[in-house]
Amino acid sequence: MKLYNPSELKKVIEMHGFSFSKSLGQNFLIDGNVLNRIVEGSGVDGESCALEIGPGAGVLTRELANTAKSVVAVEIDKSLMPLLEFTLGEFDNVKIVNEDVLKVDLKELISENFGEAPVHVVANLPYYITTPIIMKFLEDEIPVKSLTVMVQKEVADRMAALPGGKDYGALSAAVQFYTVPKIIAKAEPHCFMPQPKVASVVIRLEVQEKPTVVVKDKDRMFAIIKSAFGQRRKTLLNALSKSPYINIGKDSIQKALEELGLDVNIRGEKLSLEQFARLSDLL
Ligand code: SAM
């Protein structure tokens, strides 16, 4: 069964009387090239496991099942269950969990299903929950090797952005604190059924064993980063001294900037993650 073939997918969908839900972001992949890139790029192999979020009709799940040791796929939509049974029934290494991923205890799910094996997350989700779910994996230190996710192009650009550019912001810093991001594919609207309005990008976030910079108090550093980018038109000195997230006097901030050899009129978007870490340690 080549489920990514549009006529085959249509047949299966019609056979099960399934209708697409816009609010659940149901756009299913129908492009073999993008599928291959996701599976290859995800790093899944015979020794590792895949945690798929939002399997839809199982297009990507089938490819993951052919490659991974085992696959667990979390799908919120109950009406997709019979369809998934049909498309994945031939695999004995796939388990479907009918839950909202935001409500699942992910640590428990991973240890119960995968034990000590390395786990790669693969997700093509509605855009509004993709960033929260990525941050949940990273901030809660859920033990996974990588996250390969389909996101809007603008979001991928922000995640991978370097200091100084317009895309660099709090999301870039947070993602790059925990992972090394790499864009692995582009998916135009015609790669999906039904077609979404905007183009997507597949980004792979390789989770680092240790954060990419050393900092004494990461929560404080992220409060500083949030303050710096909350008012990005202001100088860093003004943004930090007027921030609702931290309470540090202007003099102390100015002293710290000088100690780090930074111009007192610098804007937050010019600072690297390493410089934010040093600033945080000083404040
Ligand atoms: N992975 C499939 C593919 O590429 O063809 C389907 C992708 S579709 C963009 C997103 C899927 O995520 C849908 O099947 C939708 O029902 C599911 N989904 C949406 N919100 C979810 C949630 N909170 N938890 C789990 N699955 C969710």
Image (cartoon, rainbow, N blue to C red):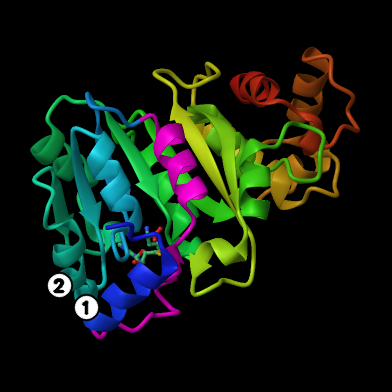
Q: Give the amino acid type for the residue marked by disc 2 in the picture.
A: Pro
Q: Disc 2 versus disc 1: distance between alpha carbons?
A: 7 Å
Image vertical order of residue 17 relative to residue 261, above or below: below
Rendered location of residue 275, percent (x, y): 70, 21
| Horizontal relation, residue 179 to residue 70: left or right | right
**Nearest the camera: 163 or 236?**
163
Task: State the residue at coordinates (39%, 59%).
Answer: 4
Rendered location of residue 65, percent (x, y): 23, 43
Rendered location of residue 90, percent (x, y): 12, 53
**Crowd band around label 1 with a 10 angstrom C-alpha radius: few (<14), some (14–19), many (20+):** some
For the residue with label 2, is its CB less than 8 Å from the closest atom of ligand 1? no
Q: Are marks 2 and 1 in contact (CB under 8 Å)?
A: yes
- The residue where tag 1 is placed is 79
Res 146 label: none
**Quadrant (top left/top right/bottom left/bottom right) for the C terminus:** top right
Q: Give the amino acid type for the residue marked by disc 1 in the picture.
A: Ser
Please tell me in which quadrant of the rendered image residue 169 appears. top right
| Horizontal relation, residue 40 to residue 226: left or right | left
Is residue 62 in the magenta section?
no
Residue 1 visible to the viewer: yes
Task: State the residue at coordinates (85%, 40%).
Answer: 235
| Horizontal relation, residue 27 to residue 87: left or right | right
Q: Which of the two marks, 2 or 1, is nearer to us in this view?
A: 2
- The residue where tag 2 is placed is 82
